[in-house]
Amino acid sequence: MSTTGGRHDVVVIGVGGMGSATTYHLADRGYDVLGLERYDVPHTMGSSHGITRIIRRAYYEHPSYIPLIERAYELWDDLAAETGREVLHRTGSIDAGPEGNVVFEGSLRSCEEHDIPHEVLTSEQVSERFPGYDLPDGHRALYQPDGGFVVPEQSIIGHVERAQAAGADIRARERVLEWEPTPDGGVRVETDRGTYDAEKMVLAAGAWNYKFTDALSGLAVPERQVLGWFQPERPATFEPANFPVWNLKVPEGRFYGLPVYDVPGFKIGKYHHRDEQVDPDDYDTEPNREDERLLREVTANYFPEAAGPTMRLATCMFTNSPDEHFILDTLPDHPQVAIGAGFSGHGFKFASVIGEILADLAADGDTDHPIEMFRLDRFDD
């Protein structure tokens, strides 16, 4: 086993959505940063793939996310300008559900509290404006014109390229085996290729984070997720210019979807697909007929013109916290280690600002961003 010379300022474990952004922000500030990724950059083994990922200003999960999503938009636009990559596409967004449901009511509340431009539509009005939709009678929908999608693979590549241009050392196909604190307050990281010393460390390993610290035991739980792409009868109806991204609460569950982009097919997923908690190193990564049936049934019910032949199925993972809010903090016993975990299926849109936050935590031990609700100690009670 080889040992690197010198000592890095920060080592980042995981160079997916969050880790690539963190590595970029650290390198851009002049830090000597090493990014370690066990798979390719980018890859399809974790939570940072899928061709398109929803972004929306109307945030029903909690109004406290609004300041972070506003900053995320700014940083995505900055990344696009710096790299020339189209990482953010604005299509508008629809959040719909029956009267009193949090998907609609929470989105409306967040828009009203933060003066976010929006419209309230009936299900009939949604269908008139966007013919691909056939929402249930009596549903209410919040339309927000700035919603859309982030292109995950392009955003990771963009962050990695900018990080490398700023001097970061990023190494793919190098698996971290273990780490330990050093007596001088730093860390030592052992991989299958070498050993590295650093002043600070960032855990951004997604579904594998809990394997690197007991502090995340039971708090960052991987879950198998499946996505489907079905070919529409009239693809133009479901192109980004004509079809907003969406979140929908129906009797079958809570679903989300996106327009046709880059590959054939309308994209759909179900939150907590089949409630399958998994070991990220040992689970069924091949979608099956039941996975397909679950997604196709809802497509046929509420987007009937999109329920054509299956074009693609893919697995990924959610990593869920108990309250489904993020975990952003430093480890209580090892403050030189920052963690970004538990993104619970709604984190990628924030990756640009999460990278800024984790860089703050690694460099300074704190951040000016409002992350009080995401601290680890909320689980102490």
Image (tube, rainbow, N blue to C red):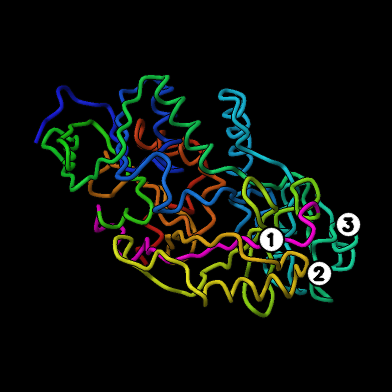
In magenta, the rendered stretch is: 212-236
Q: CA distance from mark 1 to mark 2?
A: 17 Å
Q: Quadrant of the N terminus?
A: top left
**Dots 1 and 2: beta carbons under 8 Å?**
no
Extreme residue in the front direction: 309
Q: Which mark is residue 129?
A: 3
- Mark 2 residue type: Asp
Would residue 301 appear left or right of 222 to someone viewing this image? Answer: right
Q: Is residue 219 magenta?
A: yes
Sooner in the amino-acid sequence: mark 3 or mark 2 = 3
The residue that label 2 is drawn on is 134
Q: Which mark is residue 163?
A: none
Sooner in the amino-acid sequence: mark 3 or mark 1 = 3
Nearer the observer, 136 or 85: 85
**Dots 3 and 2: beta carbons under 8 Å?**
no
The residue that label 1 is drawn on is 231
Q: Is residue 151 above or below residue 364?
A: below
Callout 2 secondary element: loop
Callout 1 secondary element: loop
Q: Residue at x 46, y 74 (%)?
A: 275
Q: Is residue 292 magenta?
A: no
- Mark 1 residue type: Gln
Residue 39 in percent (x, y) is at: 33, 45
